[in-house]
Image (cartoon, rainbow, N blue to C red):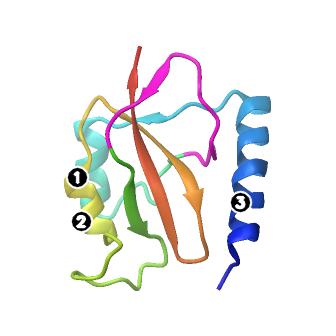
Amino acid sequence: MMSLQTIQNLQQEARKTAAKEGKKPYIVENEDIASWKAGRSLPIPFPNIGDYEPPGFTEEGEALFVDKSGFGVVGEPALTLEQMLDELIPGMGYAIVEEGQFQVYIQPFRRN
C-alpha cells in the first residue's frame, strides 16, 4: 500500500509532466465506449495529469473512483471498469487526477 506522501508526490510529478507535455483530458465518444465494452482499444487512454489545470477545460462534477487493478468487484467503494464505462458521457473529457496503487480518480472535464 502506498503512503499518502507517496501518492501526493506522484500527483505532483504527474502535474509537472502534464504541464510540460501539454496533456489534455481524453474526449470520449460513443465509439470509444462501445469499443471498450467489447474489450478492444484497451487500456483506456486517460492521461494522468495530477492536479494540473489544462487550458481550455473545466472540471465537471465529481471524479470517478475506479479500481485500476482489474480485480475489483461490484459492491466495493471503487467502480469496476465495467461500472466506470457506464458512467462515461460522450463528448466529455476524462483524465486521471489522483493515482494510488490499486485505484484512480478519473475527473470529468468540459471543453470551454
Quickly name the residue at label 1.
87
Q: Nearer the viewer, mark 3 or mark 1?
A: 3
Q: Where is residue 18 in the image (x, y as percent from the top left)?
A: 70, 37
In the visual, does 105 lie left or right of 29?
right
Using the rendered view, name the quadrant where residue 17 is placed: top right
Residue 61, placed above or below residue 87: above
SS type, badge 3: helix
Residue 46 located within the stretch drawn in magenta: no
At x 78%, y 50%, the residue is 13
Which comes before the other along the chain, label 3 or label 1?
Answer: 3
Numbered badge on residue 8: 3
- SS label for mark 2: helix
Residue beneath disc 2:
83
Mark 3 and mark 1: span between their CA atoms? 26 Å
| Residue at position x 31%, y 72% in the image | 80
Q: How many marks?
A: 3
The range drawn in magenta is: 47-61
- Report the amino acid beneath label 2: Gln
Q: Which one is nearer the viewer's eye here, 104 or 68?
A: 104
Q: Left or right of 105: which side holds 77?
A: left
Label 2, residues with CA under 10 Å away: few <14, some 14-19, many ≥20: some
Mark 1 touches mark 2? (CB < 8 Å): yes
Q: Can residue 43 be seen in this view?
A: no
Q: Which amino acid does label 3 sit on?
A: Gln
Q: Is residue 33 placed above or below 10 in the rendered structure?
A: above
Q: Nearer the viewer, residue 60 or 40?
A: 60
Q: Nearer the viewer, mark 2 or mark 3?
A: 3
Q: Distance between the residues labelled 2 and 3?
A: 26 Å
x and y percentages locating residue 3 in the rendered image: 70, 77
Three-letter amino acid code at disc 1? Glu
